[in-house]
Amino acid sequence: MPALPRIRTDVDLATIDEAEFTRLTRRALSHYGDLTRLASNPLTALPMLVKRLEQRGAPQDPIERAAELKALLAESIERLKPRGKGDFGTSDEWRYYNALYFPYIVGLRPYSRRASHQHIDDPAAKAALEWFQSAVPERTLYNWQTAATNLIAHDLRCQLEESLRTS
């Protein structure tokens, strides 16, 4: 079993600037599918994660924290999804959700020549893959991901502030 990456304990999430918090969020999203790498992200020390683990009676180990951070990121991404409009759309209101959900949660790599997407059974994911490849330039997707990451970081920051107020 590979060793877990070193976790930075010198980061005070309540006092770091917005740019650094957003950078940590972007890194967490990029490591979404790899719990061992996600475990090294300082966001695993978010107080609301600790509270959620306590409520579930789960241990406070790095993998549990990473899994809880993964769940928290998925919930934040889900809040970007337009309400009551199905599973996929191509209008402007869908772009930030699509830009994070399909590449990070579903694991689509629309511009990779090595990626095999034959395992995709979900009709929404198939439609999203086709849409990304035919209508969304790679740079545009990156820009949408950056804007969406800013929204997710802001959402997490608001949750952090609320968590600190109520504790």
Image (cartoon, grey):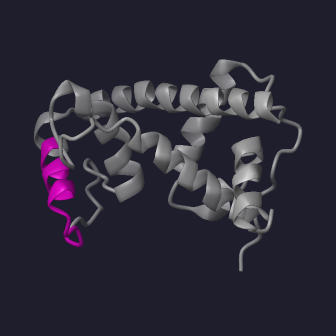
* Figure check: 145 above or below 130: above
Q: Residue at x 32, y 50 (%)?
A: 102
Quadrant in the rendering for residue 3: bottom right
Tell me the residue at 19%/45% (across/down). Answer: 88
Q: Position of residue 60 (x, y in %)?
A: 80, 62
Main SS, magenta residues: helix
**151 on left or right of 18:** left
Vertical placement of residue 5 versus 72, above or below: below
Q: Nearer the viewer, residue 93 or 129?
A: 93
Quadrant containing the C terminus is top right
Residue 155: x and y in percent read: 55, 30
* Numbered disc total: 0
Residue in view at x 74 percent, y 68 percent = 58
In the image, 113 versus 2, the foreground residue is: 2
Q: Confirm whether residue 46 shows in the render.
A: no
Query: Is residue 98 at all visible to an observer of this figure?
Result: yes
- Viewer-proximal residue, 20 or 159? 159
Q: Position of residue 64 (x, y in %)?
A: 70, 64
Q: Is residue 133 magenta?
A: no
* Picture quadrant where residue 39 is located: bottom right
In magenta, the rendered stretch is 118-131
Residue 116's place in the image compared with 96, above or below, is: below
Quadrant of the image containing the N terminus: bottom right
Check if residue 127 falls in the magenta segment.
yes
Q: Is residue 76 left or right of residue 38?
A: left
x, y percent for residue 110 = 25, 50
Q: Residue furthest right?
A: 10
Task: Examine the image and state in which quarter residue 125 appears.
Answer: bottom left
**In the image, is 114 to the left or to the right of 47?**
left
The reply, left or right, for residue 12 in relation to residue 157 is right
